[in-house]
Image (spheres, grey):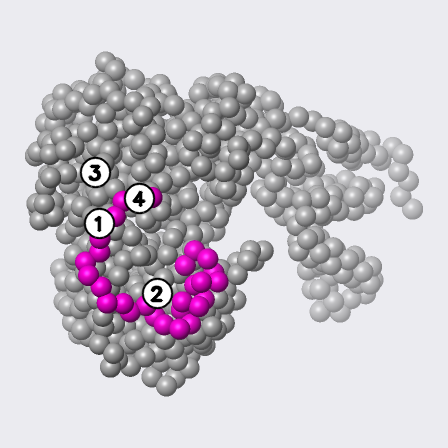
Amino acid sequence: MDYKVNLKPTSLIDPRTKLLLLFVISVYVLGGTGGEKMKVFYWILVFIPVLLLLSDRRWKLFLISVLVYGCSFVAQNLLQGDLTALQSVLALTVYVFVKFLPAVFMARYIMATTKASEFIAAGKKMHLPDAILIPISVIFRYFPTIREEYGSIRDAMKMRGIFMGGGKASQMVEYRLVPLLADSTLIGEELSAAALCRGLEVGVERTCIWQVKMRFLDHVLIGFCILTIFWSIFGGLFYDPI
Amino acid sequence: MIQFKHVSFSYTGEEKSLKDVSCSFEEGRITLICGPSGCGKTTMIRCVNGLIPHFYKGKLEGEVLINGWHTSDTPLQKLSHHVGSVFQNPRSQFFNVDTTSEIAFGCENFGMPPEEIIRRIEEVVKQTGLQDLMDRNIFQLSGGEKQKIACAGVAAQEPEVITLDEPSANLDYKGVCHLQKMLALWKKQKKTVLIAEHRIAYLLPYIDQVLVMEDGEIRETYTGEAFSLLSEEELHKRGLRGKTFENAVTMELPPVKDNKDRMVLNDLRFGYPGESMLLDIPGLELPKGEIIAVVGANGRGKTTFLRCLCGMEKRCKAMLTYNGQSWNRKQRLKHLYMVMQDVNHQLFTDSVLEEVMISQEREDKEKAMEILRLLDLEDVAMRHPLSLSGGQKQRVAVASALASKREILLFDEPTSGLDHRHMLQVADILKQLKEQGKTVILVTHDGELLKQVCTVKISLDAKKETQCQEIKHSVIRKYCRLPKPNSCG
């Protein structure tokens, strides 16, 4: 059987749209820019990553996020007015959760559905310099590595009976970080050597087999982002706080 | 045509790795560069692919010429069009997360038109039979599979020269067979191939020229034919592994005495989420105090088997009965000890002595030193574990296992990438452990190690159904003659 390269894009939207969304979510959800008038946009932005995760068939993450948001939405409405100390802590936790999670989910979605190579191609179209693009694309490759390494170290510690609170708690951080750093440095060095031997070089024209193209959904989402930014700046003129 | 003219090289702050080396590699020939660890073969390879002097810094004297260019004046980017490289460590030669992008990577860097790259990928995949590995996440592939992708990536770049640095270190029999196919293809395409390796058996049918190195110098040069006439002893003398290319899976072992106590492993079942069941072992009897080998193809789940056995896989609930005690996962974590393939993961402290002492129930310096003496580590007791050589690190891990008084020790590929002398060293340690009454279970592809020390073998078969039966009824303990030299089918 002959193999045909499958050129279908990995995800529904373009890497550039993903980055814009991450930016807008960070500013308006995490940063809370714009205040009260952004409420509708805020909740739409909260749910965009959830829908994207759904489109990528990440059922588990999707269910978790829906559940968390549902609960926190209810909680936010209940926990208002005069609160006891415990309730305030709870309210604060919920608040922080909802603020942070959308950006986290969005980042997860980007990592899961973007090929390093697609990312470089998209960056090239935005005329970003190689000096920025190449390090970022290495990060794509590096996260899973660090996770793998960290996992093995954790397993080794469990096996050797070095636990939190096992009388050796003060050294825990050191025990974990030293091998991780030693390993990451080594892998980093070998990785650079391999990449150089395969012709990766800053400033040399590079092609990409994956097509990066804006499609209908990209235009809709970008339009929405622009509207969000527009509303945050000029919305005050039309919005009448009650 | 590659020429070395009086080349010497020393890495910054180290002694000379190459001493006045002169030689040439003609077009379309396959050359094996061999010799014991640290003989300078990797340095030779790095001189050819340009990593020396462009990446690894140090003092280079003399000239390395490729097609008449001086490597020191030619930028790596330009060299990379002509020289492709496959490295030893499959974990660290990938830039992408998916296999297809990885094969395309080099060509993309050369700025080739996408249609051409796609044509090349499809051709390489067809030539090398990689259909099953395409569009996969590289992090989910086994070492051998990763190495196949690395070879394919180099092949797609279509360089005239290909260098391989201990490419078989992490491969099983099948993986090595695949590597042989790649070499046959490259030979047919008249590529100039340079391989640094001490597992030489699989290369014998393909090599045209052999350089034997020691201490940074070329000691002997052979034609491929003359080299294959050398006897096993003569090879071992040069730090090389044996001539027979043995399949650890089908190899047979001499009988063990049957009066041993046994331990019983029950209900070991495991599969990664979203995948089918990888291991399904209803019951397995293992003799105590023996050295037991776990064999099977790359990706079959050998390492996973060790991880389950040792209690590292949370979702795997098996029971191990030892000396009348039944151990669940958490108890196994306390009673078994695994020496990982990458020992760096399990050395945490800043001195060898401390490494041993944190494993003791009550810290006892005297006892710790005694263990270090036993393992020939006394001299390095105060050194930082990560500054030691690979073999020493492995022994430090063994020392900490002894300190924690564990009865069952697991080893994951203890001899991958080791030359003959170091392999024998590991074999000695394993025998020592056996003498102390420990049970050793090790995962290995290394037929020679198996022959040296193992007395019992567990095979994880390619097909789950047969594996299950095979293991249920008996641990394979067959009587046998010396293994036949076999070729690759």
- Residue B485, numbered circle: 1
Q: Is residue B118 visible?
A: yes
Q: What crowding class fits label 3: few (fewer than 14 Cα within 10 Å), some (14-19), or many (20 or more)?
A: some
Viewer-nearest residue: B279 or B304? B279
Marks 4 and 1 in Cβ contact (< 8 Å): no
Mark 3 lies on residue:
B204
**Which residue is labeled 4 in the image?**
B488
Cα separation, mark 1 vs mark 2, equals 22 Å
In the rendered structure, the answer to whether residue B104 lies left or right of residue B388 reads right
Q: Which residue is depicted at the point 29% across and 34% down?
A: B164
Query: Mark 3 and mark 4: span between their CA atoms?
Result: 12 Å
Q: Is label 4 or label 2 in front?
A: 4
Q: Are the residues under badges 2 and 3 in a single subunit?
A: yes
Q: Quadrant of residue B366?
A: bottom left
Q: Amino acid at mark 3?
A: Leu
Q: Do marks 3 and 4 share a chain?
A: yes
Q: Mark 2 = which residue? A: B458
Q: Nearer the viewer, residue A220 or B204?
A: B204
Q: Which numbered disc, 1 or 2, marks the residue that appears first in the sequence?
A: 2
